[in-house]
Image (spheres, coloured by chain):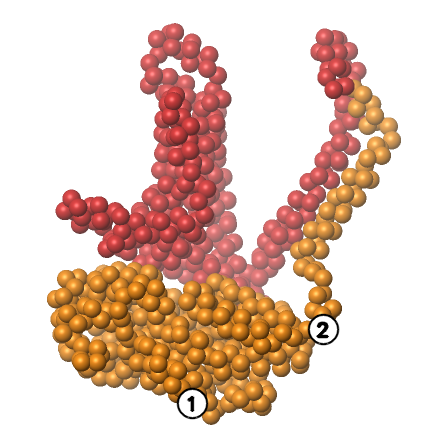
Chain colours: A red, B orange
Amino acid sequence: MTQNTHAPAPRTAPGPAAAPRGLVDVRRRPSSWTGLWFVLPFLAFYALFLLWPAVVGFGYTFTDRSLAGGDVSFVGLDNWTESLTDSAMYDSLWNTLWFTVLSVPVMVLLALGLALLTDHARRLGWFLRLSFFAPFVLPVTVMTLIWGWMYNPSLGLFNGTLGRFGIEGPEWLFSEDTAMFSVVVATAWWQVGFNYLLYLAAMQSIPKDVYEAAAIDGAGAWQRIGRITLPMLTRTTALIAVLQLIGSLRVFEQIYLMTSGGPNFATRTVIQYIYDSGFVGLRIGLASSMAYVFMVLIIAASIAQFRLFSRKEG
Amino acid sequence: MRRASRATHTPPPAGPGRRSFVAGALATAGLAAAGCAPPDTLISGDTRLRQWNLFAGGDGNRMVEMHDAYQAEHPQIDFRATTFTWGAPFYTKVAMGAAGGRGADIATVHISRLESLAPGRLLDPIDPALLAEFGIDDTVVLPNIWEKCFFDGQLYAIPIDTHVLIQYLNLDVCRQAGVLDADDRLVEVSGVDDYFDLLREIQGVTGEYGLSMDTWNPWSNFWALYRQQDGDLVFGEDDFEMDDDKALAAMDVMFRLSEEGLAPRHSRDADTAANLSNGHAGLMIHGNWEIPTLEATGIEFSATQFPAVFGNHRTRGDSHCYVFPHQRDRDPERTRAATEYAAWMLHHSLTWAGGGHIPAYQPVVESAEYDALHPQSEYREAAENVQFEPEAWFSGSAGRLQEEAAGALTTLHQGTQTPEQSLDQLKGTIRELLTVPSPV
């Protein structure tokens, strides 16, 4: 309340602004220290549960530490060599990459399309927002159960429906050729809601008078989308694309639940292979080095993509 | 302006309050994270007993039922059982708890995983004399199972049951196919050709399959078929022995079953039992733990031993058993309570048998009550025909070999690889596992 009554004073008198500026600088330092106290709990947990394990994990990469405990000895670069020469590691990296290549464009373009649709639908807007975002709140276990049954080649909804028209449906999750596509489709249905929401928020923050001015100048609906909406969304697209890239590279749980990496490892991603090596195979040292190899790749991919987008913007 | 000028002077009195608030919050969070619950057992004087298990579904319900009865009889024991997700997640927890010397008092594991749990380091030995005091020794358990409980001459496990692959019958379908005798028992067939003929007859009735089987984790089926021919798998230092011809014969059966449409190409988890219960197949090969599932469907069914595809009823199996995860300060009183608890559970394993498992405790298996259990009593000999997997850190239920072998063997059912190609892949997998230094 007191602030409000004082507020007009500096606005109406811009002249003496130089004097308080000195005060502002002095004020900033202690207030940023106060801020530190507020982030301290987060920082403490971040350091304890993220930074410290990451450092310890890096140390493990040079040992033969086992999940079953026991003596630990230094093995030098053995784990790194094994990670980098293991063909199954490359297969799983390839699967991860394939999932990413398939899923990122779908998840970005689909989100954009759905957001445009919602933005233009006046009456049904609430219904579309609900429908497109609802799957996102489902737990992964529920999503995989639903889609697992729908994909079932002999008892499932898809092939049952196709069968009515006399078409023999594919084997979906059960064939090496179609398993990854099927997972991507299910993932897109499940996860696109988040990107969609980001796009929708960005679209709704574009000033309406820009569109009005364009409409007065005779721009049609498509021109308005192509010349105003899409360019104004570049930053959002860059953000969504990077987030989606990282998310897709880290894919694990839905694939693990839907196919456990099968058939014949056609969908085993690198995270699952790390999990298999560490938790089923008990080799924590090896799994740590694999995780580090993968981390380097994710960072490199993110930087590369971010550069690409920021250059476009410039 | 006013706030700015205040900040340039002495720190506001609210500062320390905020700090102590944060410190207090952190301390509270730290305490909560450390799990500092009030030491209730110290107050009550009860013996604390913590059990970890991996039983959910039908098994889990029966174990809860038994635990309720156990607790009613043992009010002085502060007993708590925790169920974790089956498979690798469970073994990870057991191993990590024991590696830190803070394992549960008693845990259930698969006997095939004994070696991967490093007996002597992650598992504490069990005193056979104490166990005998409670009525469990080598006279009440089948010898082939009892001997699996030893490691380096010391007892490390108390067997609860044997679980094996058995063959289920959809009685309605089998009756129509005319493959049952007057007592509703499946006609005895022996040999690959006879078995395939039997399945063809059943297929004639269902119009779909003759046999329903899990094609997603086919290692167990392979092991049963391979062992029926006396096939051996011996692990050496960096090489192994496997009988290629026998492995190929077993793989050929799996390949042809799906290729001819006698068994599905794809069947996983719930699909397998669904195919039998909805009449898409007349027979099913699955673990004996599926009995509660089939009972829930309400169909008329029975069960028998694993089919004699290669002339005998040998079947892949494993045993659930109790172990004592390593504790740095093992309390004799709690150890005694844990031993007594295990013996109590064995004595009352008739309830456990209801879930399909064959109890390890022979007096139960030989009892009239067990005789009356149907179809459990139809396959009790399976415990003598059980074929365990070879001992290695990577073998056993939910182990690395099972996981890696599934990849090669699934292709047989899908028809994407010939038995020869699949065998090559399987051998490559085993060779790779052997090159890995044992993490145990």
Q: Position of residue B310 (x, y in %)?
A: 22, 81
Q: Are labels 1 and 2 assigned to the same chain?
A: yes
Say if mark 1 contacts mark 2, CB within 8 Å: no
Q: Dot 1 falls on which chain?
A: B
Which numbered marker is on residue B361?
A: none
Query: Where in the figure is residue A7, as x and y percent of width and height?
Result: 73, 15
Q: Residue at x 42, y 38 (%)?
A: A134
Label 2, residues with CA under 10 Å away: few <14, some 14-19, many ≥20:
few
Q: Which label is found at residue B45?
A: 2
On screen, residue B221 versus residue A27, left or right, reads: left
Mark 1 vs 2, N-terminal side = 2
The picture places residue A97, in percent across and down from the top left corner, at 38, 47
The answer to which of B76 and B401 lies nearer the viewer is B76
Q: Residue B170: x percent and y percent?
A: 23, 69
Q: Which mark is residue B143?
A: 1
**Whether residue A44 is visible:** yes
Residue, x 59% and y 88% (percent of image)? B130
Mark 1, Cα crowd under 10 Å, few <14 / some 14-19 / many 20+, is few
Q: Amino acid at mark 1?
A: Pro
How many numbered marks appear? 2
Image point (40%, 26%), residue name: A125
Q: Quadrant of the N terminus of chain A?
A: top right
Badge 2: chain ID? B
The residue at the point 37 percent across, 41 percent down is A189
Q: Amino acid at mark 2?
A: Gly
